[in-house]
Image: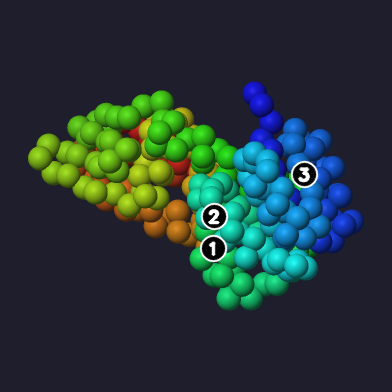
Amino acid sequence: MSKTKILLAEDDNNLGILLKTYLSAKNYDTELYVNGSLALEAFHSGSFGLCILDIMMPEMDGLTLAKEIRLTSPEIPIIFLTAKNQKEDIIDGFKTGADDYITKPFSMEELLYRIEAILRRINTSPAALKDDHYVIGGYSFDPLKQMLSFGDQNIKLTTKESELLELLCRHRNEILERNFALKTIWIDDNYFNARSMDVYITRLRKYLRNDPSVKILNVHGRGYKLLS
């Protein structure tokens, strides 16, 4: 399997070298640039699979850089690095199309988990699904159309409802690890995302209640199990 090529834009040379060395050791082909202008020039002349951008940089900040990248490559994953923790900075980042952000200081392992979660999500996008249809007891589930059907009743699922049900189907009669589901769908396994996933599980149980043979069980300390 070919390496994922990462564009890393970070004006702190010590941190940049540390990140580049770590990611290279983890089999990611990483190129480091110390400002946004150099990074944009490199992006247009190279072929990258993911971008990690510091928000505060000289010549061109990360938000502006992301907007420029999105003009020609709207699908490329972008992770922001920021020393700020204000809500406004996070919102501005997501408005530019960021896939995730991470606040300094952070551990190398945390950044690696974020990268892996995003790449997993891309590799399990609807176009790459192994199955385009699942039978769950008396239900029919089409993840491409995000449609759950029972007889003549059709339920249009939200994107996250569909992604979560599809993960449960792929792990049918096995334990779907809670942290794996959170990192795959929500990218971050923090408290708020965990509570959000609990809400989606409750919704899915409600949708599936017409067939008593179908159950989503809580596995204490582990995750969930879809039985059908």
Q: Name the secondary structure under disc 1.
A: loop
Amino acid on which the number 3 mark rests in the picture: Glu
Amino acid on which the number 1 mark rests in the picture: Thr
- 16, 152: nearer the viewer: 16
> Is the residue marked by circle 2 packed among few (<14), some (14-19), or many (20+) residues within 10 Å?
some
- 29, 225: nearer the viewer: 29
- Report x, y in % for residue 127: 40, 33
Q: Tag on residue 70?
A: 2
Q: Tag on residue 96?
A: 1
- Report x, y in % for residue 55: 69, 65
- Report x, y in % for residue 19: 81, 49
Q: Name the secondary structure under disc 2.
A: helix
- The answer, for residue 114, to whether it is visible in the render is yes
**Quarter of the figure with the C terminus:** top left
Say which residue label 3 marks.
31
Q: Quadrant of residue 30?
A: top right
**Residue in the image at 64% along x and 23% along y:** 1
